[in-house]
Image: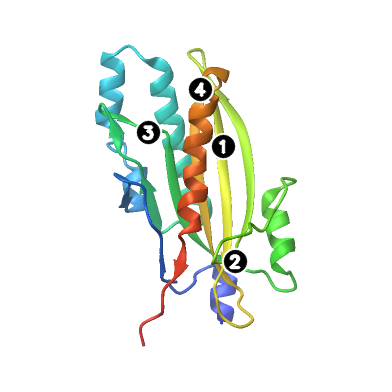
Amino acid sequence: MSTLREELTGAVRPTLYSILLPPGWRKVAPAELASEDAAAPSLAAMRAAGRPELILQVRGMLSRFRAALRDSRAFDAYLPPAVDGVMLPAGLLVAPFVLPSGVDWDAAASRMAKGAEVERPEGTETSMLVWRRAEKVADDAATLVGRTSHYLVPVDEPDTRRALHFQYTVLVADSAQIADAVDTLEGLGDLMMATMRWRPTPA
Protein backbone atom coordinates (compact mmCIF):
# COMPACT_ATOMS: atom_id res chain seq x y z
CA MET A 1 0.00 0.00 0.00
CA SER A 2 1.12 3.57 -0.62
CA THR A 3 1.76 5.84 2.35
CA LEU A 4 0.13 9.24 3.00
CA ARG A 5 3.46 10.88 2.16
CA GLU A 6 3.54 9.08 -1.19
CA GLU A 7 -0.02 10.10 -2.00
CA LEU A 8 0.58 13.76 -1.13
CA THR A 9 3.89 14.12 -2.93
CA GLY A 10 3.32 11.71 -5.81
CA ALA A 11 6.49 9.83 -4.87
CA VAL A 12 6.07 6.07 -4.85
CA ARG A 13 8.29 3.12 -4.17
CA PRO A 14 9.89 1.59 -7.27
CA THR A 15 7.68 -1.14 -8.73
CA LEU A 16 9.50 -3.92 -10.53
CA TYR A 17 8.23 -5.08 -13.91
CA SER A 18 9.49 -6.76 -17.06
CA ILE A 19 8.72 -6.11 -20.71
CA LEU A 20 9.98 -7.70 -23.93
CA LEU A 21 11.39 -5.28 -26.50
CA PRO A 22 11.50 -5.58 -30.30
CA PRO A 23 14.95 -6.17 -31.81
CA GLY A 24 17.20 -3.14 -31.49
CA TRP A 25 15.10 -1.33 -28.90
CA ARG A 26 16.98 -0.20 -25.79
CA LYS A 27 16.28 1.10 -22.33
CA VAL A 28 17.68 4.58 -21.61
CA ALA A 29 17.71 6.95 -18.67
CA PRO A 30 14.94 9.57 -19.05
CA ALA A 31 17.58 12.28 -18.55
CA GLU A 32 19.11 11.19 -21.85
CA LEU A 33 15.95 12.33 -23.65
CA ALA A 34 16.22 15.77 -22.09
CA SER A 35 19.75 16.26 -23.42
CA GLU A 36 20.23 18.45 -26.48
CA ASP A 37 22.77 15.87 -27.66
CA ALA A 38 20.22 13.03 -27.71
CA ALA A 39 19.35 13.43 -31.40
CA ALA A 40 22.41 15.28 -32.67
CA PRO A 41 23.65 12.47 -34.98
CA SER A 42 20.20 11.93 -36.48
CA LEU A 43 19.59 15.65 -37.01
CA ALA A 44 22.96 16.03 -38.72
CA ALA A 45 22.17 13.13 -41.07
CA MET A 46 18.78 14.61 -41.93
CA ARG A 47 20.21 18.07 -42.62
CA ALA A 48 22.79 16.53 -44.94
CA ALA A 49 20.00 14.64 -46.74
CA GLY A 50 17.82 17.75 -47.04
CA ARG A 51 14.91 16.26 -45.08
CA PRO A 52 13.31 19.10 -43.08
CA GLU A 53 10.16 17.05 -42.41
CA LEU A 54 12.24 14.42 -40.60
CA ILE A 55 14.01 17.10 -38.57
CA LEU A 56 10.61 18.36 -37.41
CA GLN A 57 9.61 14.78 -36.66
CA VAL A 58 12.57 14.11 -34.38
CA ARG A 59 12.44 17.49 -32.67
CA GLY A 60 8.71 17.08 -32.12
CA MET A 61 9.21 13.63 -30.65
CA LEU A 62 11.88 14.83 -28.23
CA SER A 63 9.72 17.81 -27.26
CA ARG A 64 6.84 15.47 -26.42
CA PHE A 65 9.15 13.24 -24.39
CA ARG A 66 10.47 16.22 -22.42
CA ALA A 67 6.96 17.43 -21.67
CA ALA A 68 5.99 13.94 -20.49
CA LEU A 69 9.10 13.80 -18.29
CA ARG A 70 8.12 17.07 -16.62
CA ASP A 71 4.49 16.10 -16.16
CA SER A 72 4.76 12.46 -15.14
CA ARG A 73 8.10 11.94 -13.32
CA ALA A 74 8.97 9.12 -15.75
CA PHE A 75 11.73 6.87 -14.49
CA ASP A 76 12.22 4.53 -17.49
CA ALA A 77 12.35 5.19 -21.23
CA TYR A 78 12.69 2.89 -24.23
CA LEU A 79 13.80 3.92 -27.73
CA PRO A 80 13.89 2.10 -31.08
CA PRO A 81 17.04 1.65 -33.15
CA ALA A 82 18.20 4.16 -35.75
CA VAL A 83 17.81 3.22 -39.41
CA ASP A 84 20.50 4.65 -41.71
CA GLY A 85 21.46 7.01 -38.90
CA VAL A 86 17.90 8.32 -38.43
CA MET A 87 15.85 7.74 -35.26
CA LEU A 88 12.58 5.89 -35.71
CA PRO A 89 9.78 8.22 -34.53
CA ALA A 90 8.57 6.20 -31.54
CA GLY A 91 9.26 5.71 -27.87
CA LEU A 92 7.90 4.37 -24.60
CA LEU A 93 7.95 6.17 -21.23
CA VAL A 94 7.12 4.66 -17.82
CA ALA A 95 5.96 6.74 -14.85
CA PRO A 96 4.48 6.06 -11.39
CA PHE A 97 0.86 6.81 -10.60
CA VAL A 98 -1.04 6.93 -7.30
CA LEU A 99 -4.83 6.60 -7.36
CA PRO A 100 -6.45 9.68 -5.77
CA SER A 101 -8.55 9.12 -2.66
CA GLY A 102 -12.21 8.40 -3.34
CA VAL A 103 -11.65 7.52 -7.01
CA ASP A 104 -11.70 4.07 -8.61
CA TRP A 105 -9.46 2.97 -11.48
CA ASP A 106 -12.08 3.40 -14.20
CA ALA A 107 -12.83 6.96 -13.08
CA ALA A 108 -9.13 7.81 -12.82
CA ALA A 109 -8.46 6.51 -16.33
CA SER A 110 -11.45 8.43 -17.71
CA ARG A 111 -10.11 11.65 -16.20
CA MET A 112 -6.67 11.06 -17.66
CA ALA A 113 -8.13 10.15 -21.07
CA LYS A 114 -9.92 13.53 -21.33
CA GLY A 115 -12.77 12.23 -23.42
CA ALA A 116 -10.97 9.43 -25.24
CA GLU A 117 -12.50 5.95 -25.01
CA VAL A 118 -10.98 3.77 -22.27
CA GLU A 119 -10.88 0.01 -22.67
CA ARG A 120 -9.65 -3.03 -20.81
CA PRO A 121 -7.91 -5.22 -23.42
CA GLU A 122 -8.78 -8.90 -23.49
CA GLY A 123 -6.13 -11.55 -23.73
CA THR A 124 -3.47 -9.76 -21.67
CA GLU A 125 -2.13 -11.56 -18.63
CA THR A 126 -1.67 -8.26 -16.78
CA SER A 127 -4.80 -6.16 -16.20
CA MET A 128 -4.59 -2.64 -17.64
CA LEU A 129 -6.70 0.27 -18.87
CA VAL A 130 -5.89 1.66 -22.31
CA TRP A 131 -6.78 4.83 -24.21
CA ARG A 132 -5.36 6.61 -27.24
CA ARG A 133 -5.02 10.23 -28.25
CA ALA A 134 -3.83 11.97 -31.42
CA GLU A 135 -2.86 15.54 -32.21
CA LYS A 136 -1.17 17.41 -35.04
CA VAL A 137 2.15 19.25 -34.94
CA ALA A 138 3.03 21.58 -37.82
CA ASP A 139 5.46 24.19 -39.09
CA ASP A 140 6.29 25.60 -42.53
CA ALA A 141 8.02 22.37 -43.58
CA ALA A 142 5.54 19.65 -42.68
CA THR A 143 2.48 18.55 -40.71
CA LEU A 144 2.94 15.66 -38.31
CA VAL A 145 0.50 13.55 -36.35
CA GLY A 146 1.38 12.45 -32.85
CA ARG A 147 -0.36 9.30 -31.69
CA THR A 148 0.00 8.29 -28.04
CA SER A 149 -1.28 5.07 -26.52
CA HIS A 150 -1.65 5.17 -22.73
CA TYR A 151 -1.56 2.04 -20.58
CA LEU A 152 -2.49 2.41 -16.91
CA VAL A 153 -1.46 -0.78 -15.08
CA PRO A 154 -2.51 -1.12 -11.41
CA VAL A 155 0.02 -2.94 -9.26
CA ASP A 156 -1.00 -6.54 -8.58
CA GLU A 157 -1.62 -6.34 -4.82
CA PRO A 158 -4.77 -6.25 -2.62
CA ASP A 159 -6.59 -2.88 -2.56
CA THR A 160 -3.76 -1.29 -4.49
CA ARG A 161 -3.65 2.42 -5.15
CA ARG A 162 -0.35 2.24 -7.03
CA ALA A 163 0.11 1.82 -10.76
CA LEU A 164 2.51 2.38 -13.62
CA HIS A 165 1.55 4.63 -16.51
CA PHE A 166 3.13 3.60 -19.82
CA GLN A 167 3.02 6.11 -22.70
CA TYR A 168 3.87 4.89 -26.19
CA THR A 169 4.18 7.70 -28.74
CA VAL A 170 4.54 7.66 -32.52
CA LEU A 171 5.09 10.95 -34.39
CA VAL A 172 4.81 10.73 -38.18
CA ALA A 173 3.99 12.74 -41.28
CA ASP A 174 0.28 13.37 -41.86
CA SER A 175 0.05 11.28 -45.02
CA ALA A 176 -2.30 8.55 -46.23
CA GLN A 177 0.60 7.04 -48.17
CA ILE A 178 2.28 5.77 -45.02
CA ALA A 179 -0.86 4.81 -43.09
CA ASP A 180 -0.01 1.09 -43.08
CA ALA A 181 3.53 1.73 -41.85
CA VAL A 182 2.20 3.99 -39.11
CA ASP A 183 -0.32 1.36 -38.00
CA THR A 184 2.47 -1.21 -37.84
CA LEU A 185 4.71 1.08 -35.78
CA GLU A 186 1.81 2.01 -33.51
CA GLY A 187 0.95 -1.67 -33.05
CA LEU A 188 4.38 -2.29 -31.54
CA GLY A 189 3.18 -0.54 -28.40
CA ASP A 190 0.37 -3.04 -27.94
CA LEU A 191 2.73 -5.94 -28.63
CA MET A 192 5.24 -4.73 -26.04
CA MET A 193 2.57 -4.11 -23.42
CA ALA A 194 1.12 -7.58 -23.99
CA THR A 195 4.41 -8.90 -22.58
CA MET A 196 4.38 -6.64 -19.50
CA ARG A 197 4.60 -8.61 -16.23
CA TRP A 198 5.08 -7.69 -12.58
CA ARG A 199 8.25 -8.93 -10.92
CA PRO A 200 8.47 -9.98 -7.26
CA THR A 201 9.85 -7.33 -4.93
CA PRO A 202 13.04 -8.53 -3.23
CA ALA A 203 12.66 -9.15 0.50
Q: Nearer the viewer, mark 1 or mark 4?
A: 4
Q: Residue 70, how many percent across, how many down?
A: 48, 50
Pointer 3 residue: 88
Q: Are marks 1 and 4 in contact (CB under 8 Å)?
A: no
Alpha carbon separation for disc pair 1 and 3: 14 Å
3D distance between C-alphas at marks 2 and 3 = 29 Å
User: Based on the displayed image, in which of its 4 quarters is residue 86 positioned?
Assistant: top left
Could you tell whether 102 is left or right of 160 in the image? right
Q: Earlier in the sequence, mark 4 or mark 2?
A: 2
For label 3, the SS is: loop
**What residue sits 37% from the left and 33% below the top?**
88
Say which of marks 2 and 3 sits in front.
Answer: 2
> In this figure, which colouring scheme has been used for the structure?
rainbow
Q: Kindly indicate the quadrant of the structure image that contains residue 9.
A: bottom right
Instruction: Give the class, few, some or many, for how many residues have Cα within 10 Å of label 1's Cα (few <14, many ≥20).
Output: some
Which residue carries the number 2 mark? Answer: 127
Q: Would you identify the image quadrant in which residue 159 lies?
A: bottom right
Circle 4 residue: 178
Residue 61 position, x and y percent, is 45, 35
The residue at which mark 1 appears reads as 147
**Is residue 173 visible in this depiction of the protein?**
yes
- For marks 3 and 4, the one nearer the N-term is 3
Mark 2 falls on what kind of element?
loop
Q: Residue at x 55, y 33 (%)?
A: 146
Measure the alpha-carbon separation of dots 1 and 4.
14 Å
Q: Nearer the viewer, residue 50 or 190?
A: 190
Residues packed near mark 4 inside 10 Å, few (<14), some (14 to 19) or many (20 plus): few
Disc 1 and disc 2: Cα gap in Å? 22 Å
